[in-house]
Amino acid sequence: MCGILAVLCCSDDSQAKRVRVLELSRRLKHRGPDWSGLAQHGDCFLSHQRLAIIDPASGDQPLFNGDGSIIVTVNGEIYNHEELRKSLPSHKFRTGSDCDVIAHLYEEHGENFIDMLDGIFSFVLLDKRNNTFLAARDAIGVTPLYIGWGLDGSVWISSEMKGLNDDCEHFEAFPPGRWYNPPWFSETIPSVPYDPLVLRKAFEDAVIKRLMTDVPFGVLLSGGLDSSLVASVTARHLAGSKAAEQWGTQLHSFCVGLEGSPDLKAAKEVSEYLGTVHHEFHFTTYDVTSIRASTPMFLMSRKIKSLGVKMVISGEGSDEIFGGYLYFHKAPNKEEFHRETCRKIKALHQYDCLRANKATSAWGLEARVPFLDKEFINTAMSIDPEWKMIKPELRRMEKWVLRKAFDDEENPYLPKHILYRQKEQFSDGVGYSWIDGLKAHAAEHVTDRMMLNAKKIYPHNTPTTKEGYYYRMIFERFFPQNSARLTVPGGPSVACSTAAAMSWDAQWSSNPDPSGRAALGVHLSAYEAKKAAAPLAAGTGPEDIINNKKARMVEVAAAPAVAIST
C-alpha cells in the first residue's frame, strides 16, 4: 500500500506551502518507503509515498495522462488494468503501473469510469483543464482515506489522519463506495439457491487475480478456515501464474502467536499439508477488538518485511459475508442473519479493513483480501441466507456453505478437521493469554476511581472497561482533536457483533466483550466465569461433524511479557 496526501484550493502556492505539504507527506512514508513524489498546479498539491509492487522501475507517482493535463495520486491495486489498457488503444501510457489507467479512463469516460475498476483503491485526481478534482475510495473501503477542511477554504485528503489532523479545522473518514450499489446493499433478502461449485469458482477467481505482482509475496496463514483456504487456493494456482515465472512456485506462509497457541499449531499443520515454506513468529509477551488483533499483525508484518516480502494475501472479510462470528449461532431467522451480514460488510472499513491495512502498511507491506473481491461478494451475498444459517440439527456449523464448497473428497483443499475447525477470532487465536494479559496490564494502569469518572472524561464513546479506557488514553495523546475521536465507531458488542444483534441473546448485555469467547454456550473455550451457560447440543460441535478430535488445541497459558522472538 502507498500513502497519498492532497491539499486542494488552499489559496497559497508559495514555496513555504510546498515544503509544508512535503513535510506532512513524509508522515506517511512508512506506507510507501520506495519513492516520494509531488505534483503542484497552482494552489493544489498532490503528493505520494510509493510502495512499488507493479512496475517498480518506472511506476512512480503522481501519474499523468498523455498530455499531462490530468494528474492522479493513487493508493491501491487495479487487478484488471491490462484489460482496461486494451480498451484504450489510442492512449499512450507512460508506465507499466496498474494505476496508470486511472487518468486515461477519466479522460475518456469522465467520472463514470470508477465502476470499471476491479481492485482496491483510494485516489485524488486533478483536472488542470478546468481546475476540478475527483476523489474516490474502493467499494468496501479496503484502503483507508480521510478528508479534512481548513479555515482557508482548503480541502485535504490523506491516507491516514496524521497527514491532515494538525492543519484542518475538521476532518472525518472518507466514505467508501459511493458509486457502488449492488442488490445486497439495500438488505433485500436474496433467494438464489446455494451452488457450492459456483461459490468455489468465484473465490478461486478472486485469489488468482491477486497473484498479480512484480515483487516477492506470501500468504498470512493463521490455521483458521479463511486463511487456510487462501493459502490452499494460492498454492494450487501459483504454478501457472506470471508471479511464478519471476519468483518460482514455492509459496511462503507466515503466522504469529504465543507459543502453544491454537493458530500456531493449526497453521503449521496446514503448511505441511500444502508444502509451503512456513515462517512462524512468536511473541512472549481505542477500539478494543482492533487493538487486540492489530498488535500481533503489526509485529508479524515487521518480520515479514525484513525477509524481503512486500505483499501478502490475507483472509479478512469472510466472517462478515458468511456470518462466521460465533454470535451468529443465535440469529433468530434468516432475515436477521442476512441484515446483520450486510451491516457487518458496510462497517468493514471501520474495523478489519482498517486494522489489516494499517498494521501491515506500518512496515511497507501490502495486504490483499480476496474475500472482499466485488464479484465474489456479489456471488456470496446473492445466496438465500437460509443456507448460511447455523443449524446444528442439520450438522451445519458457522460458514458451512464455504466449508462445503471446498470439501472435495477426490482432490482435497485442506485436511478435514482444518476445514471444519471452529471459528477463532485472530486476537483469540494467537493465544488466549494475549487477551488475558492485555486486560491484566490495563487493570494495573486504570483504577476503579478513573472508571467512575469515565463518562465525564470521555463523554463520547465512553469506555466501559479498563482495557478500553487504557487504549483511549493512548489514542487521545496522539489525536486530541474532537474530529479524531468521532472517526472511531462505538456501541455495545459481543464477539464482534453490531449493536443491533445484541438483542439476540439476553445474556450478552451483561457480558459485552468483543472476544469470541464471550459467545457463551457456543465457543468451546468460553470464559470460565460463564461456564454455567448451556453447552452445544451433543453431537453438533465441529468435532462431531468431522468425527475427529476437538478443534480446540491449547490450554490457557500464563500472562505474556513483551519480548519478541522468531
Image: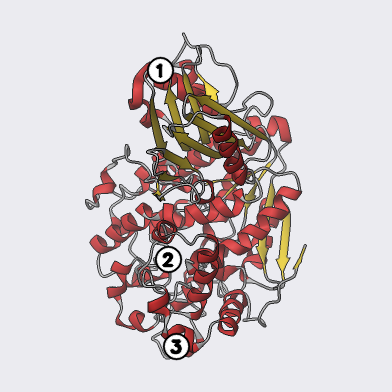
Which secondary structure lies at badge 2? loop
The answer to which of marks 3 and 2 sits earlier in the sequence is 2
Q: Label 3 belongs to which residue?
A: 530
Which secondary structure lies at badge 1? helix
On the question of residue 111 being in view, the answer is yes
Residue at position x 57%, y 61% from top?
A: 294
Measured in 3D between alpha carbons, the distance from the residue under mark 3 to the one under mark 2, in whole angstroms, is 19 Å
Labels 3 and 1 touching (C-beta < 8 A)? no
Q: Label 2 belongs to which residue?
A: 325
Labels 3 and 2 touching (C-beta < 8 A)? no
Q: What's the mark number on residue 107?
A: 1
Measured in 3D between alpha carbons, the distance from the residue under mark 3 to the one under mark 1, in whole angstroms, is 61 Å
Disc 2 marks a residue whose amino acid type is: Tyr
Q: Quadrant of the N terminus?
A: top right
Disc 1 marks a residue whose amino acid type is: Glu
Residue 354: x and y in percent read: 49, 53
Q: Between label 3 and label 1, give the one nearer the viewer.
A: 1
Residue 473: x and y in percent read: 52, 71
Residue at position x 70%, y 51% from top?
A: 304
The answer to which of marks 2 and 1 sits earlier in the sequence is 1
Which secondary structure lies at badge 3? helix
The picture quadrant where one finds residue 212 is top right
User: In the picture shown, does residue 555 fall above or below 352?
Assistant: below
Measured in 3D between alpha carbons, the distance from the residue under mark 2 to the one under mark 1, in whole angstroms, is 44 Å
Towards the viewer: 410 or 266: 266
Towards the viewer: 187 or 413: 187
Disc 3 marks a residue whose amino acid type is: Lys
Q: Quadrant of the C terminus?
A: bottom right
